[in-house]
Amino acid sequence: MTWKKPQGTFRIVCLGGSSTYGIGPSSTWTNWPVKLGAELGARSARPIEVVNLGCQGYSTFESQINLALRGVDLEPDLVVVYHTINDLRCALYPGVARDNTHWRAVWPVERKLPLESALEHSITYKAWRRYMTGWWEERQNLGAYVIVDFGKYAPDDYAQPTDPDLGFDASRRNLVNIVALSRAHGAEVLLVTEACRMGDLDRFGSAALQRAGYERMTQLIMDVAQARGVPLCDARAVLESTADAQRAESGTDRIFVRPDKKNGEVHMTDEGCLLLAQTLAKRIAELGLVK
């Protein structure tokens, strides 16, 4: 695709975290933004392009920046916002700050000492570092790079919030900014509630706090939609009720990634992504957003 929108094309930009980026589905081509493009394309004679601007770990803090510096240059007609879980965890993380610097770390640049560079010529040293230290685990875990003091509050980073009200107020501000920025550049906005297998939160000691935070963020999204006259899609209700029905029938659901996997919660399977895409396409059609 090109930065310049092709003549006659209806372009959608999707903002979100890892569940938008595509952690969970089997491939890039089965994530929900791709499926949304296919669903809308089958319903419209007009060319449709759906651009995935989701990124692992992003909250509304990063998404408003992403929209300002990249998204609006794509000339979107519609901005779809799919956020909840990362925002609530920002709000529950200790030392909350209104600019999110308590949570989002500056990506570190490793500068090796001369001795370490010399030692890396030794297979014995590299084997010791790999298996006898935490070096490899740190490099496998994105949180170690992008979250301030990651692991410092073990075993549960979200069990000791300091000022969650400030965190949730910041998320509200971010959503308002996303709406204003989109409209200033001629795009409509669709706010979407994020679905979650809530039982997966029970592995945390802060499960009650996170569950309450999830409900608070969902209501916050709905409140912003109502206050700003923004279209809303309550996708959470559709996906979670479908998953509940599947679990009642067979003991497991096919909407979210298996609960024994560490990346469960909001991350969807191919079937879950398709259901979300169909739910969004139906709502977009009901609202007449593709003109």
Image: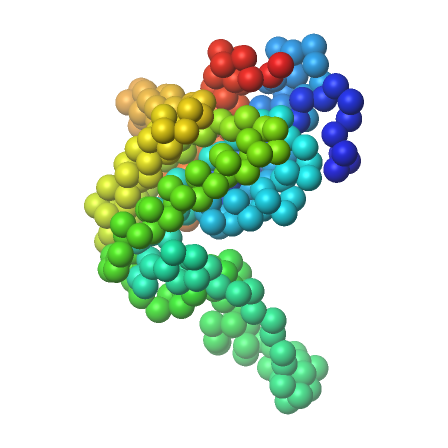
Return the x and y of residue 257 as percentages of the image width and height. 44, 37
Which quadrant holds the C terminus?
top right
Return the x and y of residue 217 as percentages of the image width and height. 33, 39
> Of 256 and 88, which appears nearest the observer?
88
Residue at figure coordinates x 62%, y 11% from the top left? 43
Residue at figure coordinates x 44%, y 38% from the top left? 176
Return the x and y of residue 45 as percentages of the image width and height. 70, 10
> Of 45 and 25, which appears nearest the observer?
45
For residue 194, side relative to residue 289 (left or right): left
Exactly how many numbered labels are in the figure? Answer: 0
Asked whether residue 286 appears in the rendered view, the answer is yes
For residue 252, side relative to residue 136 (left or right): left
Q: Residue furthest front?
A: 184
Asked whether residue 264 appears in the rendered view, the answer is no
> Of 83 and 4, which appears nearest the observer?
4
Residue at figure coordinates x 36%, y 29% from the top left? 227
Q: Which residue lies furthest to the bottom in this view?
A: 115
Q: In this view, does 106 lie above or below 278?
A: below
Q: Is residue 89 above or below residue 49?
A: below
Residue 211 lies in quadrant: top left
- Identify the colour scheme used: rainbow
Q: Is residue 240 above or below residue 109?
A: above
> Of 119 and 222, which appears nearest the observer?
222
Residue at figure coordinates x 61%, y 33% from the top left? 185
Return the x and y of residue 68 as percentages of the image width and height. 59, 44
Which quadrant holds the N terminus?
top right
